[in-house]
Amino acid sequence: MIPRTTIDEANKHITGLHKKVYELEALVKQQNEALHAKDEFHQEKLSELSSAKEMEIGMLQEKVQAKERTVTILQEQMSQKNQQLAVLQRNCRALKKVISFKTDLSELLVAIDEVDSCFKNTSMDLIGEEFYDDERSAASDSGLGASVQLYNGNLTGSSTQDELDHQGYNSSGKHRHKNSSKAREFYL
């Protein structure tokens, strides 16, 4: 038969093994709970990061759309500015063309002033005389000219250089008012 001491030792050994198994099971359970908690924590963090990234992507998409709208507006404004620039360039060319006639216009104004002074300085009883401007050659070079007729002291009309030459002949070859006793003409 087996001695009592051997049975007691075997029982102690089995009790120790059971105790060790319970401890190991408790440790495994504790580690499983810790792993589960870590897994939940990581899932929450991943979910937070994912939602934050989605929000950031949404904000960036809104910014991109806003920038695209701004670019569209700027392109429309640039098109309008280009049209305005084209109009201003046309106006500038026209103004330069007008300015190129400044000398001719100033010569014409000088000639008109001289004619005006002739009217003031000449008595009204001089009839049928013709007065020529000293500047008529400059006026003919520029293509500008005019005749002024005075009937009994009243200014009645004007003709362009195309209608009359410097001798007072019109396009039909007739001398305009030269023989009229009531007319006085000035040719530029």
Image (cartoon, rainbow, N blue to C red):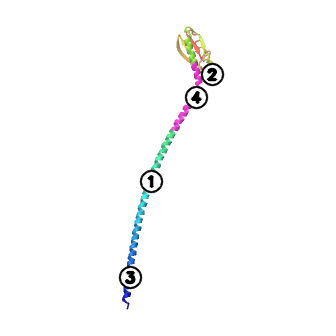
Quadrant hosting residue 40: bottom left
Quadrant hosting residue 163: top right
Q: CA distance from mark 3 to mark 1?
A: 62 Å
Among the two numbered marks 2 and 4 on one chain, the one whose residue lies closer to the N terminus: 4
In the depicted structure, whether residue 181 falls above or below residue 82: above
Relative depth, front residue between 173 and 176: 176
Residue 92: image x %, image y %?
55, 31
* SS at circle 4: helix
Q: Which stretch did the figure color magenta?
A: 81-110
Q: What's the amino acid at mark 1?
A: Glu
Among the two numbered marks 4 and 3 on one chain, the one whose residue lies closer to the N terminus: 3
Q: Which residue is mark 2?
A: 141
Q: Quadrant of the N terminus?
A: bottom left
Q: Which residue is mark 3?
A: 14
Among the two numbered marks 2 and 3 on one chain, the one whose residue lies closer to the N terminus: 3
Residue at figure coordinates x 41%, y 65% from the top left: 38
Q: Which residue is mark 1?
A: 56
